[in-house]
C-alpha cells in the first residue's frame, strides 16, 4: 500500500515538473509599432496577433498613441529589455533615435526584428518592410500617367526621420525626374502624421501654386488631408492625387474619382512576417537580413 502511494506521489511530481517545464518553454515577445491609432497599425496588429497564435508565443503589443512621440517609443522598448522578453519586433518612428536602445537589446541577448521602417544601426536580426522605394516609384508612374507626362506637382511628405516614408519620397522624386522630365515638383510640405496638419499644408500648396496639376502623399494621414483640401476647393479630378495606403475616405475618394490611384501595401502581412521571422530566429534558424514585401497600385476607375 505504501509502495502504491509512493508511486503515485512520484508520478504527481513528474507531472508537475513536466508542466512547469512546458510553461518555461513559452516564449514572450514584445512588438512595438510606430503608433496604435491609425488603421494601418490596427491591421498590422491583426497580423501580429495571428502569427503569435500560430507560433504559440505570448505577445506584448505596446506602442505610443502618436508617431511623433519618439520618447515614448524609446521608453516602451527599454521596458521590454528590462523585462527580459525573449525577442522584440519594433517599427522605429525615427531612423537614429533607437540605435543605442537596440544595441542594449543585443548586449542583453534579445534578438530584434525591425519592421516597416528602417533604423540607422545594424544590431538587428532582420528588417521586414514594404519595398518603400518601389512604392514611391509606382506612385510617380501613376501620377505621371494621370497628368499625361507634364505639369506641376506637390509632394505631401510624412515626417522628418521616418525611414519608410523618406524612401517612398525618394523613389517618387527620382522616378519622376528620370521618367517624366516635364513634370516638376514645385511644393513640398510635411503632414507630421496628422490629417488636420496635412489638410492645412495641402491648402497652402494649392493656394500658393494655382497651376498645380497633381499631388503625391507618402502616407495615409497626408493622403486624407490632401484629398480633403482638393475636395474643399472643388478641384477633385482636376488636381490628380496619388495616395499611399488605404482607409475609408481614400476608398470613397477613389470611387468618386477625386483620387487618381492608390499605392497599397499589406499591413497584415507585415505584422505576420515580422513575428514569424522573430520566432524563426529564436528557434535558431538563419533569417534574411532584409525581407522586402512588394507594393501594388490600384488605379481608380
Image (tube, grey):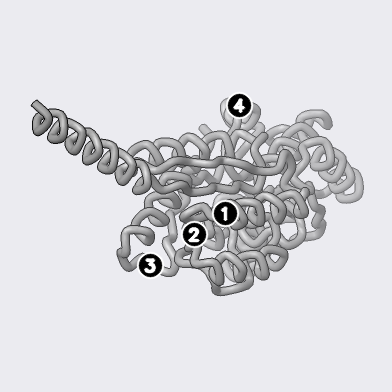
Q: Residue at x 60, y 47 (%)?
A: 33
User: Residue 126 location in percent, x, y?
Assistant: 45, 64
Q: Residue at x 16, y 34 (%)?
A: 6
Secondary structure at badge 3 equals loop
User: Residue 179 location in percent, x, y?
Assistant: 57, 66
The label on residue 288 is 3
Q: Which mark sits nearer the N-terminus, 2 or 3?
A: 2
Q: Is the residue under label 3 in contact with that under label 2 (CB below 8 Å)?
A: no
Q: Which mark sits nearer the N-terminus, 4 or 3?
A: 4
Secondary structure at badge 2 equals strand
Q: Is residue 176 visible?
A: no
Secondary structure at badge 1 equals strand
Q: Residue at x 58, y 29 (%)?
A: 251
Residue identified by numbered label 4: 248
Q: Is the residue under label 1 in contact with that under label 2 (CB below 8 Å)?
A: yes
The label on residue 246 is none
The label on residue 113 is 2
Q: Is the residue under label 2 in contact with that under label 4 (CB below 8 Å)?
A: no
Q: Which mark sits nearer the N-terminus, 1 or 4?
A: 1
Q: Which mark sits nearer the N-terminus, 4 or 2?
A: 2
Amino acid at each position: 500500500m505504501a509502495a502504491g502511494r509512493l508511486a503515485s506521489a512520484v508520478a504527481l511530481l513528474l507531472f508537475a515538473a513536466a508542466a512547469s517545464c512546458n510553461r518555461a518553454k513559452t516564449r514572450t515577445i514584445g512588438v512595438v509599432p510606430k503608433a496604435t491609432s491609425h488603421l494601418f497599425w490596427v491591421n498590422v496588429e491583426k497580423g501580429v496577433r495571428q502569427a503569435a497564435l500560430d507560433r504559440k508565443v505570448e505577445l506584448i503589443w505596446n506602442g505610443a498613441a502618436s508617431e511623433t512621440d519618439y520618447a515614448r517609443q524609446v521608453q516602451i522598448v527599454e521596458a521590454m529589455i528590462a523585462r527580459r522578453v525573449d525577442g522584440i519586433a519594433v517599427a522605429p518612428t525615427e531612423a537614429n533615435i533607437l540605435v543605442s536602445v537596440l544595441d542594449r537589446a543585443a548586449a542583453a541577448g534579445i534578438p530584434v526584428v525591425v519592421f516597416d521602417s528602417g533604423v540607422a544601426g545594424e544590431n538587428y536580426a532582420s528588417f521586414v518592410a514594404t519595398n518603400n522605394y518601389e512604392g514611391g516609384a509606382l506612385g510617380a508612374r501613376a501620377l505621371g500617367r494621370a497628368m499625361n507626362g507634364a505639369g506641376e506637382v506637390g509632394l505631401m511628405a510624412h515626417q522628418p526621420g521616418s525611414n519608410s516614408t523618406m524612401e517612398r519620397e525618394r523613389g517618387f522624386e527620382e522616378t519622376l525626374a528620370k521618367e517624366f522630365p516635364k513634370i516638376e515638383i514645385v511644393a513640398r510640405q510635411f503632414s507630421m502624421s496628422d490629417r488636420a496638419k496635412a489638410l492645412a499644408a495641402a491648402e497652402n500648396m494649392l493656394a500658393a501654386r494655382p497651376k498645380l496639376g497633381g499631388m503625391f502623399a507618402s502616407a495615409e494621414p497626408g493622403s486624407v488631408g490632401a484629398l480633403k483640401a482638393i475636395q474643399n476647393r472643388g478641384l477633385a479630378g482636376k488636381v490628380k492625387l496619388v495616395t499611399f495606403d488605404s482607409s475609408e475616405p481614400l476608398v470613397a475618394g477613389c470611387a468618386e474619382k477625386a483620387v487618381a490611384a492608390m499605392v497599397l501595401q499589406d499591413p497584415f502581412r507585415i505584422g505576420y512576417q515580422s513575428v514569424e521571422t522573430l520566432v524563426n530566429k529564436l528557434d535558431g534558424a538563419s533569417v534574411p537580413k532584409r525581407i522586402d514585401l512588394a507594393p501594388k497600385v490600384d488605379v481608380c476607375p
